[in-house]
């Protein structure tokens, strides 16, 4: 069962400048940064708040590190802005299967590694009213990196 909005992914051209905007404008601080080579992005997770299920909600800022990444292609077509919404779940495998059984296309056959050691998959935006949707199972707090 989906338990929370895990994060909102925002594509940007300049991660450092965008982080500074969120810090100066809203007071959000960087909780985690990493380069995800598999997805071709450099990212910063800005923690917004904790949640009842022990997780948290974030703004995820994404800057492409290769022109071939899906985020780079998305930026070239759409410019900066909201890229996707992610829902937290304790069981990304089970929820992806259940949602797929309802006719929604799941983009990965098996969940992949996401931010901070999480496991993720995506749902096709054409099946989700135009919204690229991510399902996320967070790594245990002591394993987040």
Image (cartoon, helix red, strand yellow):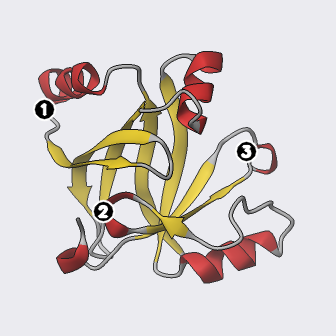
Task: Report the side of 116 relative to 36 (left or right).
Answer: left
* Quarter-of-image position of residue 141: bottom left
Residue 119, compared with residue 77, is above or below; it is below
Label 2 secondary element? helix
Whichever of callouts 3 and 1 sits on the residue coming sooner in the sequence is 1
- For label 3, the residue is 125
Whichever of callouts 3 and 2 sits on the residue coming sooner in the sequence is 2
Q: 109 or 6, which lies in front?
A: 109
Distance between mark 2 and mark 1 Cα atoms: 22 Å
User: Residue 96's mark?
Assistant: none
Neighbours of disc 2 within 10 Å: few (<14), some (14-19), many (20+): some
Q: Residue at x 80, y 50 (%)?
A: 127
Neighbours of disc 3 within 10 Å: few (<14), some (14-19), many (20+): some
- For label 1, the residue is 27
- For label 2, the residue is 116
Q: Residue at x 74, y 51 (%)?
A: 124
Where's residue 14, x and y in %? 33, 20
Whichever of callouts 2 and 1 sits on the residue coming sooner in the sequence is 1
């Amino acid at each position: 069962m989906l338990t929370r909005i895990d994060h909102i992914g925002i594509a940007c051209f300049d991660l450092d400048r965008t982080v500074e905007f969120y810090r100066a404008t809203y007071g959000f601080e960087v909780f985690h940064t990493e380069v995800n080579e598999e997805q071709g992005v450099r990212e910063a997770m800005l923690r917004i708040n904790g949640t009842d299920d022990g997780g948290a909600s974030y703004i995820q800022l994404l800057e492409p590190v290769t022109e071939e990444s899906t985020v780079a292609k998305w930026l070239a077509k759409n410019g900066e802005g909201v890229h996707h919404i992610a829902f937290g779940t304790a069981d990304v495998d089970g929820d992806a299967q259940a949602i797929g059984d309802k006719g929604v296309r799941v983009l990965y056959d098996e969940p992949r590694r996401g931010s901070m050691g999480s496991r993720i998959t995506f749902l096709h935006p054409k099946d989700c009213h135009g919204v690229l949707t991510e399902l996320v199972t967070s790594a245990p707090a002591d394993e987040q990196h």
